[in-house]
Amino acid sequence: KAGVTQTPRYLIKTRGQQVTLSCSPISGHRSVSWYQQTPGQGLQFLFEYFSETQRNKGNFPGRFSGRQFSNSRSEMNVSTLELGDSALYLCASSLGVAGSTDTQYFGPGTRLTVL
Amino acid sequence: AQSVSQHNHHVILSEAASLELGCNYSYGGTVNLFWYVQYPGQHLQLLLKYFSGDPLVKGIKGFEAEFIKSKFSFNLRKPSVQWSDTAEYFCAVNARYNNDMRFGAGTRLTVKP
């Protein structure tokens, strides 16, 4: 079974631009969660989608948004990029809703650099 | 909201030494507990998880963790580490049926051959 895939793997943007990251979950998984990983803040939860609905959102500004499609693929968008948005963005999928007993499987991440 | 603290930022051991990484969380309700590992250049992988039942959980690659409810702890152990265990280890917790997964800051383990 293919794992969680994320595209692109690396991205360089400049301040003020916007960016869209994509995540394809493991086949059959309906929950997709997004995390931001930085050396200073560690791993922080962004949001979770299940069956195209956002179930939960972390403490991030409104510039961070996401959506999920009917095939469970998810996109994350960051508008008006700031230098502090430079991070590794991780996507994780699980069969059922996150917080159930289902394991989350992580993708390799998208490395975003904001110049 | 729950929070997670990992006591050690960087641990250096020689091969065959025993390992114990501390993890404490703060949350009053029922939680799911996890240990993830991130090997150099690889993505996060689940080592083990605890939802209920026997508080001593066995995971992959000889790792185990013990949930002590009274201490809000979920420490990771391995009796004899190998060079290939060099990685970053993350403890994580989420409240049952609510995904707001909180990760600890991570512990970097270096195993000297």
Image (tube, rainbow, N blue to C red):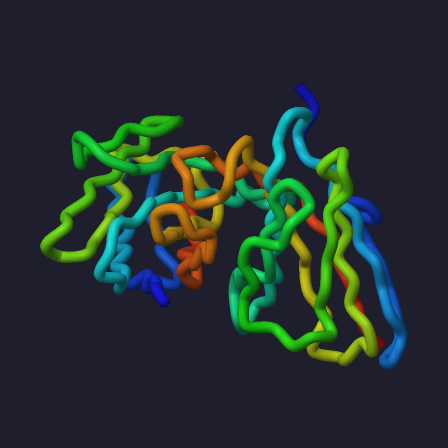
Name the residue: 52% across, 34% down.
A96
Horizontal arrangement in the rendering, residue A77 relative to residue B109 (left or right): right
Of all residues, the one furthest to the top in this rendering is A1
Image quarter of residue B107: bottom left
The one of A107 and B111 positioned closer to us in this rendering: A107
Residue B1: x %, y % from top left? 36, 67
Q: Quadrant of the C terminus of chain A?
A: bottom right
Horizontal arrangement in the rendering, residue B94 relative to residue B29 (left or right): right
Question: Eyeballing the image, is A2 above or below A13?
Answer: above
The one of B102 and B106 positioned closer to us in this rendering: B102
Name the residue: 60% across, 49% down.
A33
Name the residue: 87% across, 65% down.
A12
Residue A36: x %, y % from top left? 62, 61
Image quarter of residue A47: bottom right
Q: Quadrant of the N terminus of chain A?
A: top right
Residue A88: x %, y % from top left? 68, 59
The one of B35 and A70 positioned closer to us in this rendering: A70
Q: How many marks?
A: 0
Residue B31: x %, y % from top left? 30, 49
Horizontal arrangement in the rendering, residue A55 relative to residue A108 (left or right): left
